[in-house]
Amino acid sequence: KAGVTQTPRYLIKTRGQQVTLSCSPISGHRSVSWYQQTPGQGLQFLFEYFSETQRNKGNFPGRFSGRQFSNSRSEMNVSTLELGDSALYLCASSIRGANEKLFFGSGTQLSVL
Amino acid sequence: QKEVEQNSGPLSVPEGAIASLNCTYSDRVSQSFFWYRQYSGKSPELIMSIYSNGDKEDGRFTAQLNKASQYVSLLIRDSQPSDSATYLCAVLTSGTYKYIFGTGTRLKVLA
């Protein structure tokens, strides 16, 4: 069974631009969650989707948004990029999203210059 | 106060020793607790989950949970150099789908 696939693996953007990251969950997994990982803050929860609905959102500004499609694939968008948005963005999938093992993708390393 | 706190380390232990990793959490309604291991440059992977007070053993790993003290720990027996990684504690609050992670403890097992 294929794992969680995130694309692209690396991105370099400049301040003010926007970016879209993609995540394809494991087949049969309907919950997709997104995390931002930085050396100082660790893994911080962005949002979680299940069956195209956002069920939980973390404490990030509105510049961070996401969506999920009917095939459970998810995208995350960051608009008006800031230097502080440079981080590893990880996507995780699970069957239902509660009390379960999260399967993480390899992440997208975003650098904002 | 952070929602999930861990000592960042590094925690250095000699090969064959017991490594003890600790985590405290602030939300009393937290219901599920997880330990993930993350090797440098890799993604986190689950090694243990625990839902009720007490100990849970899986091979060389033992998770311990004390909800009254809001404390969860991971013991690694017979530590190996391959256990050198960052260990992340994660907490799921009841009624949500939001896993809160600690910043992780870096473990170094010295050969």
Image (cartoon, rainbow, N blue to C red):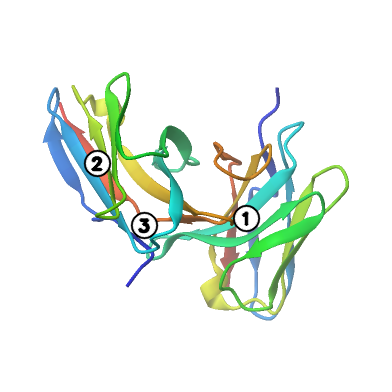
Task: Report in which chain the residue with disc 1 lies.
Answer: A
Per the image, the residue denoted by label 3 is B103
Per the image, the residue denoted by label 2 is B107
Numbered label attached to residue A34: 1
Between label 2 and label 3, give the one nearer the viewer: 3
**Residue shown at the point (32%, 40%) measured from the top left:** B53
Who is closer to the viewer here, B27 or B60? B27
B52 with respect to A49 (left or right): left
In which quadrant will I find the C terminus of chain B?
Answer: top left
C-beta proximity under 8 Å, tags 1 and 2: no
Task: Report in which chain the residue with disc 3 lies.
Answer: B
Helix, strand or loop at disc 3?
Answer: loop
Task: Report in which chain the residue with disc 2 lies.
Answer: B
Q: Are marks 1 and 3 on the same chain?
A: no
**Residue shown at the point (59%, 48%) measured from the top left:** A107
List x then y, in percent, for residue B75: 23, 33
